[in-house]
Image: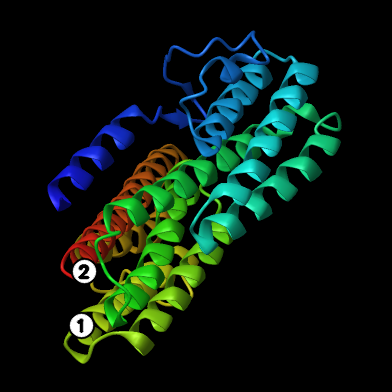
């Protein structure tokens, strides 16, 4: 039975299109038909809302604000229906909140319309996270009413917010949004520890520490790179270049500035790579904990 759920989950995930600020992958959805999702009654309300947000993004990219608003309205309506039909309290809550956000956003999209691409992309990513949350609930529905189920619900909530963090870290690069989602992850991990079987608690606590380190890297409130030998070496090189610049001729100073710019770009790339690796490791650990419940 567990295998059949896993196969179902893989099919669902494969079918989700990919959205970024660079564009949306090709799909069979026709974006010029406002009511196209009504032609697919087999789709759940969540999937219909998902498609309408994709259509809204496509219309926005074409500069068609009126059609964008129509798609947003339909997406919000489907979210409200999803909230009424879902068996998951978390999915209900997140669907309600996202519907309210979209309705509010729809009313202000006419003001500075060129500035809203990231908001649309983030709504789409949030919608994807809600679908994944409900799918995860189906996959693990074999977990009976027990301590394990209580732990599972908190872990699935943590996973949903960790998934959302991916957009904030690697697409919009919004530190504030990323910190907000990571704080949510930490909150649900703490709740999971509080109800978990003692044999599971240490793994969740260690994951919380990993998430906290990731958050520290994002916020840079601490010297998070001091243990990275490559970054330390680049910092030393930059300091030496600054010292050399004091004694250099004007022509050499220009070359030093060019070198410093290259070193800083390289340093930023290394930091981003470290954050991505830590993010992917945390998600893999969380998935392992969930599967092993």
Q: Which residue is mark 2?
A: 289
Identified at 33% across, 75% down, the residue is 145
Question: Looking at the image, is 115 positioned above or below residue 127?
Answer: above
> Do the residues under discs 1 and 2 have CB atoms within 8 angstroms?
yes
The location of residue 53, given as percent across then percent down, is 60, 30
Q: Which quadrant of the view contains residue 74?
A: top right
Is 156 on the left or on the right of 4, as rendered? right
Q: Secondary structure at mark 1?
A: helix
In-front residue for pair 259/33: 33
Q: Nearer the viewer, residue 248 or 138?
A: 138
Residue, x 54% and y 26% (percent of image)? 51
Q: Residue at x 38, y 39 (%)?
A: 255
Towards the viewer: 244 or 183: 183
Q: Residues within 10 Å of mark 2 (few under 14, many from 20)?
A: some
Q: Is residue 77 left or right of residue 189?
A: right
SS type, badge 2: helix
Q: Residue at x 64, y 9 (%)?
A: 33
Can see residue 283? yes
| Residue carrying label 1 | 200
């Amino acid at each position: 039975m567990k295998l059949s759920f896993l196969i179902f989950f893989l099919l669902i995930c494969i079918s989700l299109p990919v959205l970024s600020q660079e564009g949306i992958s090709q799909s069979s959805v026709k974006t010029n038909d406002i009511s196209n999702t009504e032609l697919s009654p087999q789709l759940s309300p969540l999937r219909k809302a998902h498609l309408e947000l994709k259509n809204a993004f496509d219309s926005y990219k074409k500069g068609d604000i009126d059609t964008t608003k129509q798609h947003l309205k339909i997406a919000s309506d489907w979210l409200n229906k999803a909230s009424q039909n879902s068996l998951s309290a978390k999915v209900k809550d997140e669907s309600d909140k996202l519907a309210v956000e979209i309705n509010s956003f729809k009313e202000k999209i006419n003001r500075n319309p060129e500035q809203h691409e990231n908001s649309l992309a983030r709504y789409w990513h949030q919608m994807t996270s809600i679908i994944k949350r409900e799918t995860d609930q189906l996959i693990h529905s074999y977990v009976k009413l027990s301590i394990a189920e209580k732990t599972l619900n908190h872990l699935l909530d943590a996973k949903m917010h960790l998934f959302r963090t991916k957009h904030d870290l690697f697409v919009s690069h919004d530190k504030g949004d990323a910190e907000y989602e990571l704080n949510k992850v930490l909150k649900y991990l703490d709740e999971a520890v509080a109800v978990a079987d003692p044999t599971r608690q240490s793994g969740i606590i260690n994951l919380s520490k990993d998430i906290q380190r990731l958050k520290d890297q994002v916020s840079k409130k601490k010297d998070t790179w001091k243990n990275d030998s490559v970054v330390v070496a680049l910092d030393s090189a930059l300091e030496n270049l600054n010292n050399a610049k004091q004694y250099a001729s004007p022509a050499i100073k220009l070359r030093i500035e060019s070198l410093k710019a290259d070193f800083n770009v390289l340093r930023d790339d290394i930091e981003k790579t470290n954050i991505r690796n830590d993010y992917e490791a945390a998600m893999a650990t969380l998935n392992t904990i969930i599967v092993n419940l």
